[in-house]
Amino acid sequence: MCLILFAYDTIPEYRLILAANRDEFYSRKTASMHYWNDRPAILAGRDIEAGGTWFGIHESGTFAALTNYRDPASMKTGAPSRGHIIPGILDSEKPVKESLEELKSDCSGFNGFNLLAWDRENLYWFSSVTRDLRTIEPGIHGLSNHLLNTEWPKVQKGRSELGRAIGQDGRIRRERIFDILKDTTRFGDEHLPDTGVGPECERILSPIFITSDTYGTRSSTLLMVDNTGRMDVTERSYETDNTNPFTENRFQVSPSF
């Protein structure tokens, strides 16, 4: 993922509403969300090149999502794929928080990342850059390629728009949320961060939904977790030119507690 917007414990009917975009090079082969043959308890899309994922759900009702931390000056060549972190946590027999504590002690080999993880009771955020491990407080939050709730323009706009899409009445306006994730508005240079990729790349990467000749938003995901722990997840995958209709996969996961 490169942008995750989520409302946690803000309305009575749902523990969590999460909306996210995955950005990637168009040439990188990807499988849409499915139950994996080699790890059948995991529901996730898959990076065909490295075998990992950016967002995954376990049949027990846990999930994890990952964003890269953008800092080209600190990139390690030959680092293992961060996509293997999520299946490792979801398929572990250890509690999610224990797995995160272990990751906190042993993540130096990876390039920088953020990890959001749910253990059916609590939502956690971990940063490999700061080594922070926090239990998320109720509210509307945003995570992109920096730290939690960093005030990048698309994070600020996305949080605000998600709050309006949910509404005071607690109704989930699904199409409105997907419209937020499809916003291609670029922000002015005066509002953009300086992450070391240069002004033109900062402009290209500034929208909620990214388009360019070689890189852009490949899929959008909407996850809703109700008060019983039941999970409703929809993934929309886009063609590389972003003009053709999307392909949609929708699943319900009803864990037994």
Image (cartoon, rainbow, N blue to C red):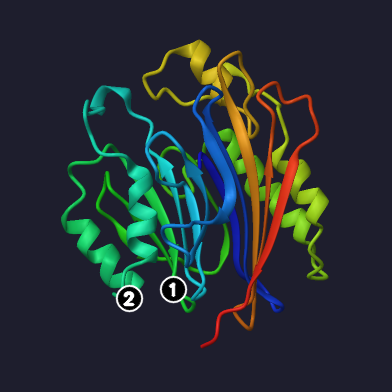
Q: Pointer 1: residues within 10 angstroms few (<14), some, or many (20+)? A: some
Name which quarter of the figure residue 215 lies in: top right
Q: Residue furthest bottom?
A: 257
In the displayed structure, 195 sits above or below 237; it is: above
Compare marks 1 and 2 and give the one earlier in the sequence: 2
Q: Amino acid at mark 1?
A: Asp
Percent position (x, y) of residue 181?
69, 41
Q: CA distance from mark 1 to mark 2?
A: 7 Å
Asked which secondary structure carries label 1, the reply is loop
The residue depicted at 38 percent of the width and 48 percent of the height is 114
Foreground pick, 186 / 176: 176
Q: Are marks 1 and 2 in contact (CB under 8 Å)?
A: yes
Percent position (x, y) of residue 146?
41, 39
Q: Which disc number belongs to residue 95? A: 2
In the displayed structure, 198 sits above or below 232; it is: above
Q: Amino acid at mark 2?
A: Pro
Foreground pick, 249 / 232: 249
Badge 1 is on which residue? 119
Could you tell whether 241 is left or right of 22 in the image?
right
